[in-house]
Every structure is written in structure tokens, then in C-alpha cells.
Amino acid sequence: MAETNKKLHIAVFPWLAFGHMIPYLELSKLVAQKGHTVSFISTPRNIDRLPKLPPNLVQFLKFVKLPLPRVENLPENAEATIDVPYEQAKYLKIAQDGLEEPMAKFLEGSAPDFILFGFTSYWIPSIASKFNIPTAHFGIFIAAFLVFTGPVPGLNNDYGGRMTLEEYTVPPKWVPFKQGRSYSPEGCNNLGSIPGGSNSVFFFIFHCV
């Protein structure tokens, strides 16, 4: 019984967009209401712009500010997608990747029981595993869209990742029934010049229309 009632320390790290941070914050509040400790990790300006916490949750929900590294072409003080035009969001993604080292230091020093991470932070599981910290991706997207993007390569399936833009213009091969959903070439015409390889392509696929 004592183990069942153990209070946990959960860390959360959403993508640098308020459409992602707010759902993560709401989930964090629900967890904190159960008496668990939550470390909400983001950049200083983003945390400062989040809604204020109810007084009864302040002792349970802690904000952890990791300064965002400066990268070329990213405007000064830009720390969220709301701060940049669409074509500059890719530099925000590159800057977020620069948080890998400070995140590792936080995980090592704080030793949370679990960490939830956003869809752009593909490097979280590899660094968390060094400290034996379990991880999970908390996605805010609807199930139908996650089906379209596909299963994780190598996770109990024989599907490899889609590495070219053309592969997104045909229906997914893992959907067994006939359907005609796919992206048009015009809808994905912004993907070809994205720096950062397949991980960045995965990120920007969410912004196709």
C-alpha cells in the first residue's frame, strides 16, 4: 500500500509553441492536484508568459527555465512559434536541439521518476535512459493524424521511416484499408529546404496544409 501511495516527480518538456505548452500545463495541473511534483521545463520567456498557477498548486508544480541557445537567423528573444514567422520556425527547432546538454544536467541532478516530451524532442529518450528515467511522448494531435504519420520504425513492426517528401504524397502503406488520404506536392513544398535531416522533416510535416 505504501508503494501504491508513493508521490512521484514528473518532468514535462513540450515543444516551444503555446498550442503545445498549454495542454502540457493543463495535464501538469491535473497531476499536481493528485499531490505529485511536476517540473514544467521550458525557456524563460515562455514560462513567464504562461497563465498563473492556482495558489493550491504552487508547491507541487515547479517551473524550470532553460535558456534557449542563440542560433543564426533566429530573432533575438524569439522562444516560441508565436515570436517568429512560419519560415523561421525551423531555426527555433534547431535552437531547441541545443537544450540537450542542459536537459541532461537537469535530469541527472533532479532524477524525476518520469518525463513526458513533445514530438520535436526526439533526443529525450536517449539522454533519459542514461539516468534510468522512463519516458513517454505526449502528443496533442488527433489519433487520425498520428495514424497518417505512422508507427515508430522498429517498434514491433516492419515499417521503415518515410525519408522523402514524395512518400508523403501517397497513402501510408501501414493502413490496410482503401483510402485516399495523402498530402499534395504543393502542400509539402516547404519541406525540401529544411535543415536537420529526417527529424526536421518529421517536424515540419505537421505544418503541411
Image: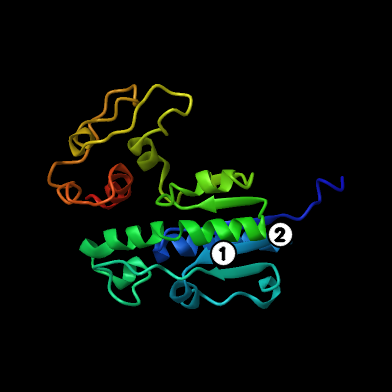
Q: Residue furthest left?
A: 186
Residue 63 pos. (x, y %)? 58, 70
Q: Disc 2 on helix, strand or loop? A: loop
Residue ID at (28%, 49%): 196
Query: As shown in the figure, which amino acid type bears the numbered disc 1?
Result: Phe
Residue 126 pos. (x, y %)? 51, 44
Q: Is residue 27 visible?
A: no
Residue 84 pos. (x, y %)? 27, 70
- Residue at label 2? 36
- Residue at label 1? 40
Residue ID at (65%, 60%): 109
From this view, report whether residue 132 is shown above or below residue 171. below
Q: Is residue 4 left or right of residue 52?
A: right
Residue ID at (34%, 26%): 175
Which colour assignment does the render follow? rainbow
> 10 Å neighbourhood of mark 1: few (<14), some, or many (≥20)?
many
From this view, report whether residue 125 is shown above or below residue 72. above
From this view, report whether residue 48 is shown above or below residue 205. below
